[in-house]
Image (cartoon, grey):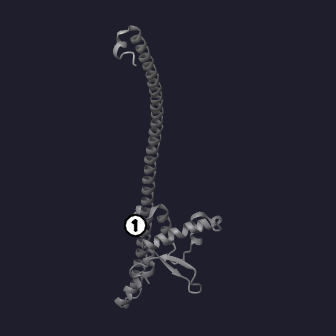
Amino acid sequence: MHPTDGAAAADPNWVVADMDVLIHQCHSKEAECDVQLARLVSGVAVLNSEIGVVRSQRQETVGTREEAERVREILLSAARAGVALRSGQRQGTARSADAADSGREDTASGADASASPTEKETAGTPPVQESAHAATVDVPAAQLGPRGIQVLQIINDAPSQQWTPKLLVAQLEGQEAVADQKAHNRARAVLDALVKKGFLVKKYQDDNPQRCYFIPVPTEGAV
């Protein structure tokens, strides 16, 4: 029988005993709640600490990305400036060659007044092949990247050369890198990419069909 049931409720001693039990139960529950609160507070502290670490890592990553974007833009700007500079030099060379040919044509006309108009025009016309070689491919730097632009400039400087990865490695990284297979693979990857983008032509040697070489895309009217 419970101390507070029936006739027992009239006895103060029974009520006191029942309150003592209830108080003990409350103390136990309080202690249990304190333990849970301490665990939760500790967990929140750990979470706050982890949140701080992740936020710090994110800020560092954002800073690194922004710096990489800035450096990339600088490199692309420099590459575009290099292409423009090389284009200006070649155009100046072509104009000088045209002026020299024109001067030779005038001299020939004065020395031989009986020459026909057709002969004069032929004498003053520069070779088509040289004009094609003097042209510079004007392409967006972002489409090729700095290494692609560098390779394209090297090949356009010697368009009659049958360019292989080995020759390109020697130009890009020096003779000491010719024996490095990884360097050959990097050069071949750039050459193949330029072929896919339509800036180079891939051909195979007549005496060895398994060996290939690369040349610039022939310009319209080139021989």
Foreground residue, 211 or 61? 61
Foreground residue, 221 or 13? 13
Furthest-top residue in view?
12
Give the vertical position of 138 relative to 12 (above or below): below
Residue plotted at (42% across, 19% down) = 26
Quadrant (top left/top right/bottom left/bottom right) for the C terminus: bottom left
SS at badge 1 = loop
Quadrant of res 6: top left
Residue type indicated by callout 1: Val
Query: Would you say 86 lies left or right of 209 here?
Result: left
- Crowding at dot 1, Cα within 10 Å, few <14 / some 14-19 / many 20+, comes out as few
Residue plotted at (44% across, 17% down) = 21
Residue plotted at (44% across, 26% down) = 37
Foreground residue, 151 or 39? 39
- What x and y, as percent, mark residue 164? 56, 74
- What x and y, as percent, mark residue 194? 46, 70
Quadrant (top left/top right/bottom left/bottom right) for the N terminus: top left
- What x and y, as percent, mark residue 72? 45, 53
Foreground residue, 149 or 13? 13
- What x and y, as percent, mark residue 190? 50, 68
| Numbered-mark total | 1
Give the vertical position of 181 relative to 24 (above or below): below
Quadrant of res 27: top left
Please name the residue that numbered disc 1 is placed on: 139
